[in-house]
Amino acid sequence: MTDVLIGLCLFCVLLGMVPTLATFAQFLAVGLHGVWNHYPKCRDFTPKVAFVLPAWNEADVLGSSIDSLMGIDYPAGQWRIYVVDDASTDHTPEVMRQKMAQYPGSVFHLRREKGGQGKAHTLNHGIARILEENWAEAVMIMDADVLFEPLTLRRMARHLADPEVGGVTAYVKEGSQPPGFLSRFIAFEYITAQAAARRAQNVMGGLPCMAGGAQLHSRENLLAIGGAIDTSTLAEDTYTTIKTQLAGRRALFDANAVVWAEEPNSVAALWKQRVRWGRGNLQITRAFRHLWFRPDRNRLFGNIPFGFLWFSIAFMPLFMIVGSVGLVGLFHAWPPWAPTAFTALWGLTFASYVFQTLFSFAIDPATAKRCWFEGIAFPGLLAVGVMMLAVLGLKPFIGSHAWPQPGTWSWQDVAVNVMLGWSAISTFLAWAVYRLDKAGAPKGLRNVMLVLIGYGPLLCAICLGAMMAQLRNADLKWDKTIKSGKARLPT
Amino acid sequence: MTATKSSFERLLAEDVGREKRIFWSEVGVAALMAFALLAYLFAS
């Protein structure tokens, strides 16, 4: 019986390593993008592009978005802006009247009299009109608050010269000015989740998601996927990306094409946004369930490593919790093996953390310069402490290299249990940070807790929240993230 | 006489150069980590 228990605990520890191994392996592929990319197939190609901006009460940000789009470096007359107003109740119509007068023939206002169905429906209203007009050769799907750098469209459009490419996405950077504490964590997260991960995915042969903030589709691709965006999930951008690739065209990421957006600066707002994303990913997992781990059905999405990557990210908190349970269980079932398992799991986490942090600083030095501390504190300073213990041993912690006997309830015993279970404990503590933030706790307290417990565990907690919401079949409503117009293009 | 590069070529060259720099950065970080790992194994 004990042998079975020990085997089970060891298996749990191995499962706990899966997300770290998957993301570490993905990071190792990032550099290959330097020698294996789509740039040799790029041509000087500037198709007629229709920008579609879905807007519901975005009056505060629309003006600057339109101005930034009208200031891009692209051949005159080759781009138009269609703002799809989802029955806004603020002064969006006035802003649009002013912008249409300022940029005649380039800016269009499409108003839905009955709105509230969400982003995908709003986008489809605009896309239908654009495809009907027959003017656009490519369509840029974006968010109303996104600001384009002058050369971003050129950088994206050059890939469409290759008819095998159906869609291109840009690097969405956090652009709040002044940046808040949480925004800086998000800025660092985007280096790892976009600038790094999506480069690696280009190398792997396909993208799971083109960012909804800047998705450029060729007209042919949009027609091939049905001429509309999926409305059945909360992750319409991921769905569209996967459909693009299943329809036979490539989806690419150009990290040098940069757009700027405002991201949430409260844990409560971040929670709302990311629960929507997390639930969307779970819906996608279900919608494409016939593909995962079946290489014979699809070269990319059925690919085994790709499946591991997808599931380890979509279900990361479960892996973390299972890993913690395995370590604590092993400590109680067979104490001599616990130190080795702990060193293996957390030592790997440490190696992955150091590699990803240092490499992220090199990938986007400008962003790293303003959020280096958040990069270091990303897993939480307490987790960094646990990693150091895994690497250096217990002596600095309990004064001896010898592990305490389990079940003695001495402070060393309790401390070791907390250390072994930290992945799970930090996820629940991160949930407590969210509850505190929602209850209006002072920002200073929230920030200190976030530094200690970590932004990574917060993302895990949110992912767990998304799973629970999905399990209890909570309402699938489009919870819009409120934008205040704080994003600015860098000067 | 050398032809002047078009803005497209300049932009492409800049981006390709950035990707190559990232490749060498990864090599550098990996080498540093490998060295640290060896030092750790040697010391422990």
Image: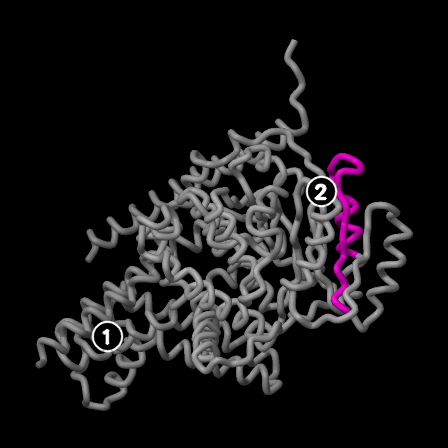
Q: Residue at x 78, y 56 (%)?
A: A64
Image coordinates of residue A83 in percent, x first then y, are 76, 57
- Residue on which the image places disc 2: A136
Q: CA distance from mark 2 to mark 1?
A: 56 Å
- Given the image, on which type of amino acid does mark 1 rest? Gly
| Magenta residues, start to end | A64-87
| Badge 1: chain ID | A
Foreground mark, 2 or 1, reads: 2
Which mark, by number, is residue B3? Answer: none
Within 10 Å of the Cα at label 2, are there few (<14), some (14-19), or many (20+) other Cα atoms?
some
- Given the image, on which type of amino acid does mark 2 rest? Ala
Q: Is residue A263 visible?
A: yes
Q: Quadrant of the N terminus of chain A?
A: bottom left
- Residue on which the image places disc 1: A326
Dots 2, 1 in contact, CB < 8 A: no
Asked whether A467 or A355 is in front, the reply is A467
Image coordinates of residue B42 in percent, x first then y, are 20, 51
Image coordinates of residue A309 in percent, x first then y, are 37, 57
Q: How many marks?
A: 2
What color scheme is it?
Answer: one colour
Label 2: state its secondary structure. loop
Q: Residue at x 63, y 39 (%)?
A: A157
Q: Is residue A279 left or right of residue A6?
A: right
Label 1: state its secondary structure. helix
Q: Residue at x 62, y 73 (%)?
A: A479
Q: Is residue A319 left or right of residue A119?
A: left
**Whether residue A182 is situated above or below residue A20 in the rendered picture:** below
**Whether residue A409 is situated above or below residue A170 in the rendered picture:** below
Asked whether B31 or A212 is in front, the reply is A212
Residue A351: image quadrant is bottom left
